[in-house]
Amino acid sequence: MTEDHKTRVLLVDDHPLVRQGIRAVLEGEPDIEVVGEASTGEEALRMTGSLSPEIVVMDIQMPGMDGIEATREVKRIRPECAVIMLTVNDEEMFLVESVQAGASAYVLKEASGDMLVQSIRALVRGGTLIPTDLLRKALSTVQVQPRRPVERVEFTSREMEILNLLTQGYGNKEMAGMLHLAHVTVKKHVHRIIAKLGVSDRTQAALKACRMGLVEQLPGK
């Protein structure tokens, strides 16, 4: 990313006032650009295809196609796009389903605008935003899907070590200590894993690895 690069963000919420409030917060940041607003899940899919956002801020509850289904379709259309789920509560069942659908983070609607800004920047940097226990629960019930020849992915032994630790929710610093590697080395391996799997971030790398049967699924706690 260049210093003058702006992260392209699409806002999806059925309430105009909510969208206006979020836009006002994000447009005050020099490194973020709001490229569009959608009021329905269906509209979000069309705009994802036409505007190529890097991050979609998605309301979890909308009439018609809800945020979870819309997230699933956004990831199908544009796998490299990250989704931040907006929710009014942190009920575990909905959050687990959101992660399995493709969400990389969630932000409570009552949270400050700064929290959303921080989440966007953390995703751009490749950070971890899903709590470990929630990630484990999401991964523990993922169904392994048969791999097609075009989905064949080759990893080095070191990348497989790191991929296994990713699915357990470890951050880069923790993995660096466990594997006796420099933090920057682990970060480079994680970026390669994400690129090889064709996903947007580490959370979705862990999810896809489980779906492809590349790692052993751990029981949720």
Image (cartoon, grey):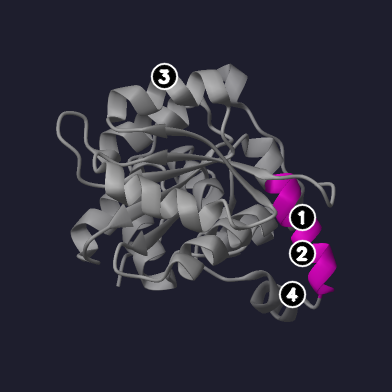
Is residue 175 visible in this depiction of the protein? yes
Whether the magenta-drawn stretch holds residue 191 is answered as yes
| Three-letter code for the amino acid on which mark 2 is drawn | Val
Residue 74 lies in quadrant? top left
- Going from N to C along the chain, the mark reached first, 2 or 4, is 4
Residue 153 lies in quadrant? top right
| Three-letter code for the amino acid on which mark 1 is drawn | His
Where are the magenta residues, as a range?
A: 181-193
Q: Which residue is mark 1?
A: 189
- Going from N to C along the chain, the mark reached first, 3 or 2, is 3
Q: Nearer the viewer, residue 76 or 160?
A: 76
Element under label 1? helix
| Three-letter code for the amino acid on which mark 3 is drawn | Arg
Badge 3: few (under 14), some or many (20 or more) residues near its Cα, within 10 Å? few
| Three-letter code for the amino acid on which mark 4 is drawn | Ala
| Res. 186 mark | 2
Alpha carbons under labels 1 and 2: distance apart: 5 Å
Element under label 3? helix
Which residue is at 53% across, 18% downward? 50
Q: Quadrant of the C terminus?
A: bottom left
